[in-house]
Image: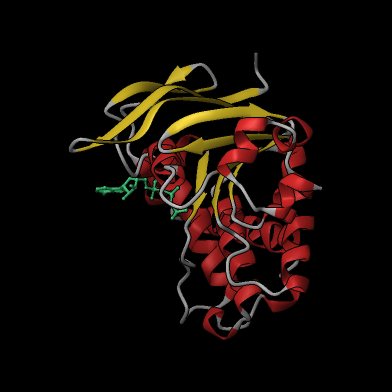
Amino acid sequence: MSDQLLVADKLTRRFGGLSANEAVSLTLTRGRLHALLGPNGAGKSTCINMLSGDLPPSEGRIYYQGRDITALDAPQRSRVGIGRSYQRTNIFPGFTVLENCRLAAQSRHQRAWRLFANALGLRDTLDKAHAVMAEVGLEAQANRIAGTLSHGEQRQLEIAMVLATDADVLLLDEPLAGMGSEEASRMVGLLDTLRRSRAILLVEHDMDAVFAVADEITVLVNGQLLATGTPAQIRSNHEVQQAYLGEEAFHA
Ligand SMILES: Nc1ncnc2c1ncn2[C@@H]1O[C@H](COP(=O)(O)OP(=O)(O)OP(=O)(O)O)[C@@H](O)[C@H]1O
């Protein structure tokens, strides 16, 4: 089905004797935000690293729009349409917001860029940069040096840079980390909008945000998939409640 953009089929990743992910399967669908939850060390980063191509799986396959992309590395996956953000902000702090977005736009079209380095190519990346700045709400900051933005704006910029690569699968690793409540609710609003035309995988510790924005939630514990379901199903799942004993989000 064309709306199923990314399918992870029984992904396993071992580090020596440890199974950081054991036969984890999940599907990312256009128009839906899928959150990945789990206590520290559950295997969330390992999972996102396998989907982004930063870490090869020990076993299992990954499909993008039906095509097996397991063998593609991270830059190749970025070019087919899978973008990721990292736990730590990953921008060029000495460049302006606009320049950061243009560099990201160029990275997707690297080959075309070299062959056709002409005015049209420059215009295309400039147009793309303006479009993504507008989409995340940073248009007014276009000429600011990225390193002088607030923490929340830097995370917005990082997402703009992922969008500039034309990604339709967004793998977002803790985009709310370190944010105050106002910045966090702005980011939740942004995720809500971005999800409409893309598929999003969200790794996030902020439970309120996850339950507010997710269409579907997968819970990992010790590298194993404990449950997948709607927020309401996950909240009332007894095994999940046990894994998160004491967490308010599961006792509402
Ligand atoms: N490169 C590595 N080498 C060895 N062990 C690793 C490596 N990366 C992760 N692990 C181990 O795999 C398990 C899962 O780690 P992972 O970082 O994926 O969990 P996580 O759910 O993202 O945790 P957190 O919420 O703390 O970020 C942990 O036991 C971790 O120590």
In the rendered image, which quarter is residue 226 located in? Answer: top right
In the rendered image, which quarter is residue 131 located in? Answer: bottom right
**Residue extending farthest left:** 16
Looking at the image, residue 247 lies above or below residue 181: above
Looking at the image, residue 1 sits to the left or right of residue 174; the answer is: right
Q: Considering depth in this image, is 45 or 244 the residue closer to the camera?
A: 244
Looking at the image, residue 158 sits to the left or right of residue 209; the answer is: left
> In percent of the image, x 37 and y 39: which residue is there?
53
Q: Considering depth in this image, is 244 or 112 the residue closer to the camera?
A: 244
Give percent across and percent down for residue 132: 67, 57
For the question of whether residue 168 can be seen, the reply is no
Give percent across and percent down for residue 186: 77, 65
Looking at the image, residue 8 lies above or below residue 191: above
For the question of whether residue 219 can be seen, the reply is yes
Numbered marks: total:
0
Give percent across and percent down for residue 221: 47, 38
> In percent of the image, x 61 and y 51: which residue is there?
163
> In percent of the image, x 53 and y 71: which residue is there?
99
Colour scheme used in the picture?
Answer: secondary structure
Q: Quadrant of the N terminus?
A: top right
In the rendered image, which quarter is residue 138 located in? Answer: bottom right
**Residue extending farthest top:** 1
Give percent across and percent down for residue 10: 42, 20
Looking at the image, residue 197 lies above or below residue 10: below
Q: Considering depth in this image, is 179 or 142 the residue closer to the camera?
A: 179
Q: Considering depth in this image, is 58 or 63 the residue closer to the camera?
A: 58
Looking at the image, residue 215 lies above or below residue 1: below
